[in-house]
């Protein structure tokens, strides 16, 4: 029987792969060359983790990480596109997506494929979780009826916020999380490799209509990082985003200030800056293809209740 491997054993590895692991015990579930849906990584016939025995539904996380040479027991596979007929529809046939929160929707309409919508500031991470949840809803409810690719660039993913949105709609959080493939990156080079080499293919293969890149600049804080090198890497990220936009709506966040904010913000088709204003959140539309700048204010609690519908 092959021995089990755990994520913390990865130090000093070889080539980077997509490692799918149990969030409860860090037991490695699957290793792939290409990014794919998390639920397809669960190869256990009973749906339980081989390491801790807990259910894998909603508990599989993904990380781009180097794989040690002695992981000879691990079978490395290629992710395969879904072929289920009728599961996905052409992007041109999809109605406009909605966050279900009038105060932001009024600034951003339409939220459609082929665009990069960027949020900066304090509330941006909450908006990213809301978008990831809303994308799974039926089209008639303002969703996309789609799985989601979530690239976590600054360890900002918050399953508790995501779960709260699911619970408000009467959906089991574990079921909703099953449709989100969240992959963490820990260096700027991993981010560039993920976005420029893997993201477009994954979005196209799996018919994903929403891609979230959380905290784009979260790994660009190293003091020894030269500006020329940072801009070179960001150019690769921008190229990957442009390719991915051909298949999906891309939502990106800049939750904290960074010297490269202006460069990244210039990629956006729509840009909303959020800030705290006397205990309330102020949202300003700074850029949009076909809308004038505007602003609105709301309490963060209103945004957190967005899945049920916030007041206008």
Image (tube, rainbow, N blue to C red):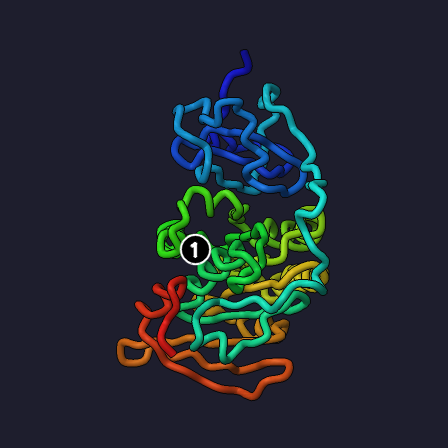
Q: Position of residue 177 (x, y in %)?
A: 47, 46
Q: Quadrant of the N terminus?
A: top right
Q: Residue 215, can we see it?
A: yes
**Residue drawn where x is 27% and y is 76% of the image:** 279
Q: Nearer the viewer, residue 27 or 127?
A: 127
**Residue 54, horizontal then vertical, whole percent:** 39, 28
Q: Nearer the viewer, residue 86 or 147?
A: 86
Q: Quick one: which residue is furthest to the top in this view?
A: 1
Q: Is residue 295 above or below residue 177?
A: below
Task: Please report the residue visible at 59 percent of the width from the left and 58 percent of the height from the top.
Answer: 210
Provide the secondary structure element on which disc 1 rests. Answer: loop
Position of residue 173 measured from the top left corner of the image (x, y, whole percent): 40, 46
Above or below, 197 against 50 in this view is: below
Position of 208 compared to 143: left or right?
right
Rendering quarter of residue 230: bottom right
Residue 232 can be seen, yes or no:
no
Q: Which residue appears at 59% of the width and 35% of the height? A: 40
Q: Is residue 75 above or below residue 150?
A: above
Q: Nearer the viewer, residue 259 or 72?
A: 72
Disc 1 marks which residue? 156
Q: Residue at x 44, y 53 (%)?
A: 157
Number of numbered markers: 1
């Amino acid at each position: 029987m092959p021995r089990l491997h755990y994520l913390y054993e990865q130090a000093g590895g070889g080539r980077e792969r997509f490692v799918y692991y149990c969030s409860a015990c860090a037991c490695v579930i699957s290793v792939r060359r290409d990014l794919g849906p998390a639920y397809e990584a669960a190869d256990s016939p009973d749906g339980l983790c081989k390491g801790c025995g807990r259910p894998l539904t909603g508990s599989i996380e993904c990380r781009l990480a180097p794989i040690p040479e002695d992981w000879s027991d691990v079978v490395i596979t290629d992710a395969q596109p879904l072929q289920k007929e009728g599961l996905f529809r052409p992007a041109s046939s999809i109605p406009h997506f909605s966050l279900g929160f009038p105060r932001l929707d009024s600034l951003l309409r339409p939220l459609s494929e082929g665009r990069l919508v960027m949020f900066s500031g304090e509330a941006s991470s909450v908006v990213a979780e809301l978008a990831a949840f809303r994308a799974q809803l039926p089209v008639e409810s303002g969703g996309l009826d789609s799985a989601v690719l979530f690239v976590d660039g600054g360890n900002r993913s918050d399953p508790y916020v995501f779960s709260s949105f699911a619970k408000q709609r009467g959906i089991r959080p574990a079921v909703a999380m099953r449709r989100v493939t969240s992959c963490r990156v820990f260096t700027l080079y991993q981010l560039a490799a993920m976005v420029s080499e893997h993201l477009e293919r994954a979005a196209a293969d799996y018919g994903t209509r929403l891609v979230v890149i959380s905290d784009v600049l979260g790994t660009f804080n190293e003091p020894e990082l030269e500006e020329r090198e940072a801009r070179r890497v960001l150019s690769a990220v921008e190229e990957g985003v442009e390719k991915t936009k051909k298949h999906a709506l891309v939502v990106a966040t800049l939750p904290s200030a960074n010297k490269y904010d202006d460069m990244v913000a210039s990629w956006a088709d729509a840009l909303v800056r959020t800030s705290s204003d006397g205990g309330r959140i102020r949202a300003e539309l700074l850029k949009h293809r076909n809308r004038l700048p505007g602003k609105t204010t709301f309490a963060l609690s209103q945004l957190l209740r967005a899945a049920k519908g916030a007041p206008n």
